[in-house]
Amino acid sequence: MTARLRLDAARCTGHGRCYTVAPDLLSDDEEGFVEQRGTDLPVPGPLLGQAADAESACPEMAITLLDAAPAPTTTDGEP
Amino acid sequence: MSEQIQQCPVSHTDYRSTTAPAGHYDLLDREREASRYHFSDTTERGFWMLTRYDDVLKGFQNPDTFTNDVTSALNPERGIDLLPQQLGGEEHARLRRVVNPYFSPAAVRRMEPFATARCVELIEELRPLGRCDFVAEFAIRYPTDVFLDLLGLPTSDGAFFVPWVEDVFGGIFTGDAERARSASANITDYFDARVRERRRNPLDPAVDLVSRLVQARRGADEEPLTHDEILTVCLTLTMAGLDTTRSALGYMFWHLARHDDDRATLIGDPDAVPAAVEEFIRLYPLVIQAGREVSRPVELDGLRLDAGEVVWLGIGSANRDPRKFPEPGTFRLGRKGVNQHLGFGAGPHRCLGMHLARVELAIVLREWHRRIPHYRIASDAPLVERGSQLTLMSLPLEWDA
């Protein structure tokens, strides 16, 4: 399943942290909001790191990374 | 402290008083760790203090319950109008849409060359002297000039603008209402003349904020802003942008003058500057609280609030909450989640000027350390931290010229 970045338009108030830490994934509009707000943005594998950074950079907790593959684990469940 | 209301301790700490530098953060840390909530009896109306990161964020994000009819818990009657921030809901959103484009990252990038040039000019003026009061001779002049330029006004007006701004804040935070009123009247008169000028000769509203305010409509088919509203917006921007930037610079340089290792990092790695700015704003928030008024009876986790009560959203407590930021009193570059600090607030009223502030501060860190990498605090005179909205009253620095 492709990872997606959910950007909650109702919560976004334009802090601009997400497109600053994830410039290859997100961009800013004329007012300084993230242009992609209100969407579930597909995240290509190489940009998963930026997507995770965007999620943890949002002061409004408006960004959620969905369906990112869990980190690989060994058979006994230990990393 | 044995008095309690609803099992909350009663706080008598008056955050309007002066302290030593960073003294207010010690007081805030102590109260947050003593109890999740306090009731402060230090103002006529009193206020409930929310101090943990999660509680403060929720307060900012629920503007229907916690309204901007009050914007400072310490000064709930306000005394002067503030636009757009005293508005709520759709009315607020519409006015924000008028001003947002002037303070977006894209707009701020356009003024970066001017800000850099002005910053360098001021530093070069001071450098041969080998000393300065950083607060009075640099930290207030620079953001004032950038602000005037951003509004399309001549920076030479900074010569009389700066003393007015000083008087407004000096008056408000020392309780000298008359001084504050007369200085803010001067600023309003100044903008009054500029606004009338733009009505006669409008400039391109895409780049000239005053022209845009003159032509703006509050939504489709609606009335233009009144003349007084435009003046209020201009005065609010002045009040919001200058004292805060000056104060942030004061704390950054107070810190760097005393921490050679952090200074060495910035001198050696200018690319670390944006991360440093963010961590400085987390560590030294100047606006330590925002006030809100409770619109309806509401039950927080263990606290019952009634309509009409005043709430203190403790920015200064939240940014140093160890539950959110481990070792919160330490300056740490690359700190996890630093971007989530509440130094600029959150929710629909988050600081309009945050992008401008970030760029202004980053420019100073880069340009100053390129030219004056080593400096120290000059005198043994005790430094004083103003209460309410924090600032260092002076910061005498010296260096080998």
Image (cartoon, coloured by chain):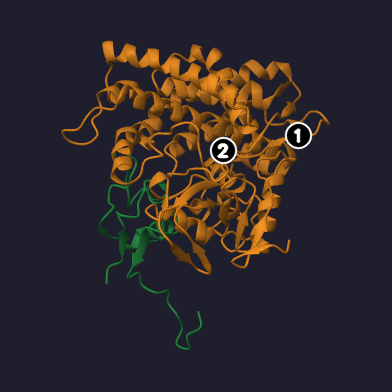
Residue B299: image location, x then y, percent: 46, 66
Residue drawn at (36%, 58%) of the image: A47
Pointer 2 chain: B
Q: Is residue B363 left or right of residue B386?
A: left
User: Which quadrant of the figure contains the N terminus of chain B?
Assistant: bottom right
In this orientation, does residue B119 appear? no
Occupied quadrant, residue B140: top right
Q: Where is residue B258, by image quadrant?
A: top right
Residue name at image x 40 percent, y 22 percent: B151
Q: Where is mark 2, residue-wise?
A: B270
Q: Amino acid at mark 2?
A: Pro
Pinpoint the chain carrying mark 1.
B
Q: Amino acid at mark 1?
A: Leu
Q: Which quadrant holds the C terminus of chain B?
A: top right
**Percent from the top left, x then y, of residue B291?**
51, 47
Relative image position of residue B98 (x, y in whole percent): 30, 33
Dot in front, 2 or 1: 1
Residue tagged by mark 1? B383
Q: Give the crowd class for mark 1: few <14, some 14-19, many >=20 residues within 10 Å.
A: some
Q: CA distance from mark 2 to mark 1?
A: 29 Å
Chain letter matching colour green: A
**In the image, residue B57 above or below residue B139:** below
Q: Which mark is residue B20?
A: none
| Residue B377 vertical placement versus B149 (above, below) | below
Residue B130 coordinates in the image, percent (x, y) = 74, 20
